[in-house]
Image (cartoon, rainbow, N blue to C red):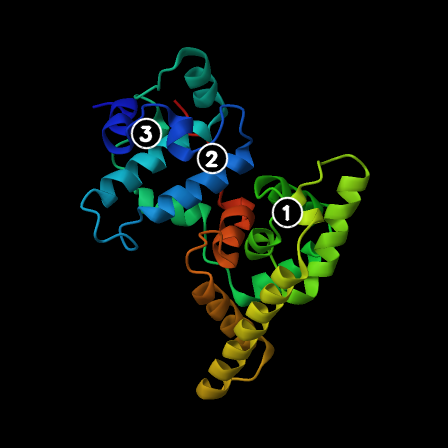
Amino acid sequence: MGLLERCQELFKTPNLYEVLGVKKDATEAEIRRSYYKVSLKVHPDRAPEDPLATEKFQVLGKLYAVLNDEEQRAIYDEQGVVDEESGILRQDRCWEDYWRLLFPKITVQDILEFEVKYKGSDEEREDVIQLYVQHQGDMDAITASALCCSQEDEPRLCSVIQAAIDSGDVKAFPAFTREGEKKKKARRKRADRERQEAEEMQKEMGVGNQEDSLVMMLQQRQKSREKNFNSFVSDLEAKYSKKSGKPKRAKK
C-alpha cells in the first residue's frame, strides 16, 4: 500500500498537507513545525493507548520526508503522486532516529541562550503578530502560546501589537483593544500563582541555581497549561531544533 493510501487509512485523507493541517503553500518552517506537533501526538512512547500509533508515526515520517525534499514535493504538488521508489522512502529506514535527528532534545542552556537572542528581536515580533491574528487579540491565548513569555513581558508584547495596529499591519480586534481590567487582573493572578507554585516546588526539592529554577518554572507552567499544546518547550523544539540535523536528500 502506497503512502497516500496509508494516509487515507490512518488519517482519513490522502492529502499530505491536510494530514499536517497546513496549506499547500506552507513554508518549510511551517511544515516542519506542524510535523513535529502532529507526530508528537502519535509518538509510540506518548500515545501507548493508540494501537496504531507506531504505524501513524512511521507514515508521518515518510510524509514529512517527501514534503521536506524539494524535488519530491514538486512532483507531489504538480502530479498529486508520490515516488514510492525514492530513496527517502526506503523500507529499512528507522523513522524514530529520523525524528530525533530533526528534533534533538534541547538543554536548559539552549533555552537560556535562545531567550537572550529572541526577546526584542524581529523574529519575536513576527511570532507575536502571528499569534495576535491567530487568536484574534485574545491576550490569554497569546501569552499562553508566546515563547519566552512571563507576566513581566506582557506590556512589551502589548506594545508590539499596538504598534502593528497603529501602522495598519493588522486589524484592531475588540478582544485586545477593549479587554477589561477584570480579565487582566485574572491573568496576573494566574501568573503569580504559577510563580508561587514553582518557588514552592524549588524549596521542596532543595534547588536554587538559575538552571534548576528555570526547569521548575517550565515544569509548573506546562502543568498549569496542560490543555494548551503549544507549551514552551514543545514550540522551542519544533521551531528551533538544530539546523544541522536536517537530513540530506537521498540520491537516486
The residue that disc 2 covers is 248
- Earlier-in-chain disc, 3 versus 1: 3
Front-most of residues 74 and 191: 191
The residue that disc 3 covers is 89
Where disc 1 sits, the SS reads helix
* Amino acid type of the residue that numbered disc 2 sits on in the rendered structure: Lys
Q: Is residue 207 left or right of residue 43?
A: right
Residue found 73% across the figure and 50% down from its top: 121
- Nearer the observer: mark 3 or 1; the answer is 1
Front-most of residues 61 and 163: 163
- Earlier-in-chain disc, 2 versus 3: 3
Q: Give me the C-alpha separation between circle 3 and circle 1.
A: 46 Å
Q: Are marks 3 and 1 in contact (CB under 8 Å)?
A: no
Residue found 22% across the figure and 53% down from its top: 48
Residue 140 in which image quadrant = bottom right
Q: Is residue 143 left or right of residue 164?
A: left
- Earlier-in-chain disc, 1 versus 2: 1
Q: Give me the C-alpha separation between circle 2 and circle 3.
A: 13 Å
Circle 1 packing at 10 Å, graded few (<14), some (14-19), many (20+), is few
The residue that disc 1 covers is 175
**Residue 192 placement (x, y as % from top left):** 59, 73
* Amino acid type of the residue that numbered disc 1 sits on in the rendered structure: Ala
* Amino acid type of the residue that numbered disc 3 sits on in the rendered structure: Leu
